[in-house]
Image (cartoon, rainbow, N blue to C red):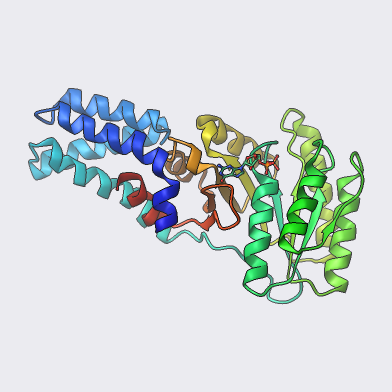
């Protein structure tokens, strides 16, 4: 909870403070109040449809319960968001899936700069801490520096990295990594990939080829295809998610840089518009700043 509290500082100060200002400015809960609220929700990036849904349901509830004072609405809003994400999220499986036997493979996809390499580095550290053996595959042979960056994380985590030179065929790097993971009975293989959304056809072919190489050796893998999204890009992250979802089957989302974003509301938009669970969140640049996503803690973190 402490991590969430600290990590969501920005989202909270912009969202929570504005919400409080809204309550301070209005004497009564009238139509202007709902219009301002709707606008604020849209700016917090919960998504247009979600913002409208929330304020519509609030209107009904306020009428039903005969709420007159803005302060009372505050509680209803928090409850509404918890319901929307928390309860809906409870039936949703946002845990990471591991192989029953043999190596587990997690494939990381997302545009450059989203935080793939950093997320892999952090997760490798946590997995190793929990007693699992880990191997990294430098499948992003496209972005300058991506290989070295992953190798640096490998050194820091004390985890081996399979890499080739820049420009090499990523599928061949992944092939070597899967072979080694099998031979050495590694518990978890984390695969970095290049994120060139500019060329969707190539990206799709590349990801397909990587997946085929994995499945040939390990029929149940990859257990997770995780889309890494930069939350500071707000609605852009949402449209990227939609594009990636068309390109490849995403099993979960890692939402990074929530510590630097006033746009924590994007979590709700993703949940409602994409129906892909957010499985992890990045709340900073340190090793332990990657957290399992907890919807209820998240919503309360926004309002504390
Ligand atoms: P990639 O191109 O997708 O592999 O992205 P990187 O892993 O290189 O990340 C891009 C930048 O975002 C780096 O400077 C990271 O340190 C930073 N970053 C990644 N995740 C987080 C996070 O959760 N919080 C913050 N503040 N920075 C992050």
Q: Does residue 249 appear anywhere in the picture?
A: no
Q: Position of residue 159 (x, y in %)?
A: 77, 63
Q: Position of residue 164 (x, y in %)?
A: 91, 49
Picture mark count: 0
Q: Residue 175 falls in which quadrant of the image?
A: bottom right
- Between 141 and 243, the one nearer to me in the picture: 141
Residue at 77%, 50% (x, y): give it: 150
Residue at 80%, 66% (x, y): give it: 218
Q: Quadrant of ligand 1?
A: top right
- Between 151 and 37, the one nearer to me in the picture: 151
Left or right relative to 52: residue 199? right
- Between 245 and 34, the one nearer to me in the picture: 34
Q: Residue 87 falls in which quadrant of the image?
A: bottom left
Which residue is situated farthest in the front direction here? 156
Quarter containing the N terminus:
bottom left
Q: Position of residue 21 (x, y in %)?
A: 22, 30
Residue at 85%, 73% (x, y): give it: 184
Left or right relative to 130: residue 68? left
Left or right relative to 146: residue 230? left
Left or right relative to 55: residue 26? left
Q: Residue 111 falls in which quadrant of the image?
A: top right
Against 37, is 153 above or below? Answer: below
Against 108, is 62 above or below? Answer: above
Residue at 51%, 31% (x, y): give it: 235
Q: Does residue 2 appear anywhere in the picture?
A: yes
């Amino acid at each position: 909870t402490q991590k969430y509290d600290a990590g969501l500082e920005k989202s909270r100060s912009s969202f929570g403070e504005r919400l409080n200002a809204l309550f301070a400015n209005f004497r009564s809960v009238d139509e202007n109040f709902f219009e301002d609220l709707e606008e604020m929700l849209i700016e917090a990036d919960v998504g247009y449809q979600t913002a409208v849904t929330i304020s519509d349901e609030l209107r009904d509830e306020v009428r039903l319960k005969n709420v007159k004072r803005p302060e009372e609405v505050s509680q209803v809003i928090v409850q509404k968001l918890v319901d929307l994400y928390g309860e809906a999220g409870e039936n949703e499986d946002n845990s990471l899936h591991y192989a029953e036997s043999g190596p587990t493979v997690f494939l990381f996809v997302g545009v450059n700069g989203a935080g793939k390499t950093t997320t892999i580095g952090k997760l490798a550290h946590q997995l190793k801490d929990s007693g699992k053996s880990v191997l990294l595959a430098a499948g992003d042979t496209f972005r300058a520096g991506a290989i070295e960056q992953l190798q640096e994380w490998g050194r820091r985590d004390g985890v081996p990295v399979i890499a080739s030179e820049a420009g090499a065929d990523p599928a061949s790097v992944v092939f070597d990594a899967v072979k080694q993971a099998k031979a050495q009975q590694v518990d978890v293989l984390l695969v970095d990939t290049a994120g060139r959304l500019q060329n969707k056809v190539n990206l799709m072919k590349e990801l397909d080829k990587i997946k085929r190489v994995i499945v040939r050796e390990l029929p149940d893998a990859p257990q997770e295809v995780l889309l890494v999204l930069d939350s500071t890009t707000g609605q852009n992250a949402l449209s990227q998610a939609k594009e990636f979802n068309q390109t490849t089957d995403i099993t979960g989302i890692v939402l990074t840089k929530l510590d630097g974003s006033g746009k924590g509301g994007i979590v709700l938009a993703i949940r409602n518009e994409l129906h892909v669970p957010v499985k992890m969140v990045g709340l900073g640049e340190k090793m332990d700043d990657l957290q399992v996503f907890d919807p209820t803690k998240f919503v309360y973190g926004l309002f504390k």
